[in-house]
Image: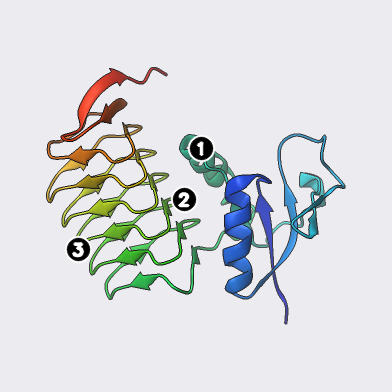
Amino acid sequence: MINKIFIYGASGHAKVIAATARLCGYEIAGFWEDSLERVGTAFLGSRIVRFEDIPQGVKVFVAFGNNRMRLDKGRQLKATFCIPTLIHPSAQIAEGVKIGTGSYIGALANIDPDCVIEDFCIVNNCANVSHDSVLHDGCHICGGVQLAGHSVIGECAMMGIGSCMIEEHSVGDDAVIGAGGTVIRDIPTKTVAVGTPAKGLNKIHG
């Protein structure tokens, strides 16, 4: 039996999700997005369809790079569709790891024992999440990030590409750590922090 999946989103992150889904044995049944302008056009060898064309209960993956949008849309769709977790075949997942609905684990990512990754998270290529860390809903751990043991990443927060955090520290909800930043102290909610050590530049409003 063919294992089909629809992908919500039709841009850069959707390309990554589609490639991983195919490696995991899925056939892409179609893509859709909120705009109707591209309905009926081809994307990565499949069609962009209308939301109304997707049967209830089928498998759907939410493929938005924007953390808050991915989480909000995913929560809305959970009641109607089956939302899987996607793990690239080259990722290393240790015993005792819990991974929530709609999360994506990228190529060569490593998740150490007893980590918790909640719903609609992204752990991107070559990222390392050390033991006993907790990644809350909707966060994004970018490529090459290094999280030491007992790290806590808040809801919809982002660790920028190549950034790192020492053990037993946290990044608050909706905070952003700039590329290459080094977190050696807790970063508050809705704060943009950059540099080594990472220092808060400004607060994110909204």
Looking at the image, which residue is at 23% across and 24% down? 200
The numbered dot on residue 66 is 1
Image quarter of the N terminus: bottom right
The numbered dot on residue 120 is 2
Q: In the displayed structure, does residue 138 sit left or right of residue 182? A: right
Q: What element carries label 2?
A: loop
View extreme (bottom): residue: 1
Give the camera-side residue of 79 and 30. 30
Q: Distance between the residues labelled 2 and 1?
A: 11 Å
Judge the density around disc 2: few (<14), some (14-19), many (≥20) Cα neighbours within 10 Å: many
Which one is earlier in the sequence, the residue at label 2 or at label 1? 1
Mark whose residue sits in front, 2 or 1: 1
Give the camera-side residue of 183 and 133. 183
Q: In the displayed structure, does residue 6 sit left or right of residue 199? A: right
Q: In which quarter of the image is residue 192?
A: top left
Mark whose residue sits in front, 3 or 2: 3
x, y percent for residue 11:
65, 44
Q: Is mark 1 on a helix, strand or loop?
A: loop
Q: How far apart are marks 3 and 1 (CA)?
A: 26 Å
Q: Quadrant of residue 24?
A: bottom right
In the figure, 44 relative to 196: above or below?
Answer: below
Looking at the image, which residue is at 26% across and 29% down? 193
In the figure, 148 relative to 137: above or below?
Answer: below
The residue that mark 3 highlights is 131
Which one is earlier in the sequence, the residue at label 3 or at label 2? 2
